[in-house]
Amino acid sequence: MTTTRAGGRHGFSWRATGPVVLVLLALAGFGLIGASLPDSPTARPPQPPALANSPVGAAATSPEAAQPAPSGLPRSVPSQIVIPKIGVHSSIMKIGTNPDGTVEVPPLDQAQLAGWYEPGASPGEIGNAVLVGHVDSAELGPAVFFSLGDLRPGDTVGVLREDGEQVDFTVESVQSYPKTDFPTELVYGPTDQVALRVVTCGGIFDEAAGDYPDNIVVFATQAQAK
């Protein structure tokens, strides 16, 4: 399934189902993508390094499985995301599901905003909080998560909440998956950790298909108190 939006771009498309609202990727993927960006290396979003000992799409073990279970915070709406490594300081909007069960995304004219999947956990709660964002758009060029693939384990992602709390997360893993092999359980499934998933498009833009072939997923867990 593919959702076509203003400007001739293709958006995200999943169908939410099941008691924990697992979201299935349906060959459309994250990010507003197109051929309008200059054909130069600087216009191509960075990709995470290939994992020599882990096949792309393998999702047998959650990155945070070995950590002790924290207590978590009460639910609160996230308002901003800050990723110092890649210069992101963006507002967050709520997203949910469309009437057909696919996941909403920020509109094209707000490609610099991240979207929080409201049916899931809020950042700071126990569970997987999911933030999605565009990689680029025809009108704006590089979007909020254009450089997401530059993140590496140990980097920090901060989320500010409407209750005044700031929750810092430590990146555990940055991986690229074919859209046909999206790790639904690891991104949207249950966990006893305070966890964050940040997702956008990845791979080399396919001119013929008019789409990126992959998704970049950042797996992070709440930073340990110092």
Image (cartoon, rainbow, N blue to C red):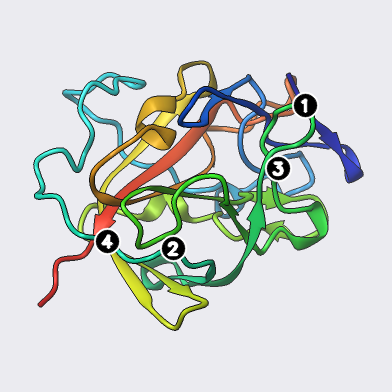
Which numbered dot is residue 100? Answer: 1
Which numbered dot is residue 75? Answer: 2
Which one is in front in this view, the residue at disc 1 or the one at disc 4?
A: 4
Q: Which residue type carries mark 2? A: Arg
Q: Earlier in the sequence, mark 4 or mark 3?
A: 4
Q: Which quadrant of the view contains residue 207?
A: top right
Q: Earlier in the sequence, mark 2 or mark 3?
A: 2
Examine the rendering and report whether any part of residue 85 can be seen: yes
Circle 3 SS class? loop
Q: Badge 2: how crowded within 10 Å, few (<14), some, or many (20+)?
A: some
Left or right of residue 151: residue 199: right
Which one is in front in this view, the residue at disc 1 or the one at disc 2?
A: 2
Residue at the disc numbered 3: 104
Instruction: Give whichever of 19, 166 is nearer the camera.
Output: 19
Residue at the disc numbered 4: 72
Q: Earlier in the sequence, mark 1 or mark 4?
A: 4
Report if the CB atoms under discs 4 and 3 are less than 8 Å apart.
Answer: no
Which one is in front in this view, the residue at disc 1 or the one at disc 3?
A: 1
Across and down, in percent, residue 55 comes to 27, 19
Across and down, in percent, residue 57 comes to 36, 21
Left or right of residue 113: residue 5: right
Which numbered dot is residue 85? Answer: none
